[in-house]
Amino acid sequence: MVSDGDNISYGTPYIASAKISADVIGTAKDKKVLVFKQKLRKNHRKLRGHRQQYTSVKINKITLN
């Protein structure tokens, strides 16, 4: 959804005439998520960790053409 004063445009799933100006701030890793699996009465255990990478973006300007 983009608002330009009184005009409001809804996108399904996006607005074709909209332009976005953005800056990439940086990349980082999220908190570690631990996945623990265990089978009942089998003495079988697995512990896996995962850290998702993400990119921080700052939106400067949204324009409609």
Image (cartoon, helix red, strand yellow):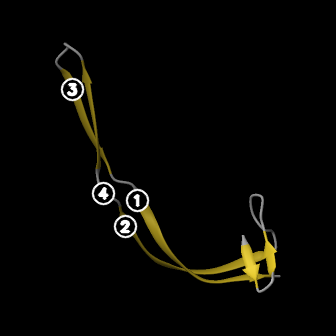
Residue at the image position 78 percent from the left and 67 percent from the top: 10
| Label 2 sits on residue | 28
Answer few, some or many: residues within 10 Å of disc 2's Cα (few below 14, many 20 plus, some between 14 and 19): few
| Camera-side residue of 5 and 44 | 5
Q: Position of residue 58 (x, y in %)?
A: 52, 79
Q: Secondary structure at mark 1?
A: strand
CA distance separating discs 4 and 3: 22 Å
| Camera-side residue of 57 and 5 | 5
Q: Position of residue 47 (x, y in %)?
A: 23, 36
| Label 4 sits on residue | 31
Q: Secondary structure at mark 3?
A: strand
Q: Earlier in the sequence, mark 1 or mark 4?
A: 4
| Label 3 sits on residue | 45
Quadrant position of the C terminus in the picture: bottom right
CA distance separating discs 2 and 3: 30 Å
- Indicate the amino acid at tag 1: Gln
| Label 1 sits on residue | 53
Tag 4–tag 3 contact (CB < 8 Å):
no
Residue at the image position 37 percent from the left and 67 percent from the top: 28
Q: Secondary structure at mark 2?
A: strand
Q: Earlier in the sequence, mark 2 or mark 3?
A: 2
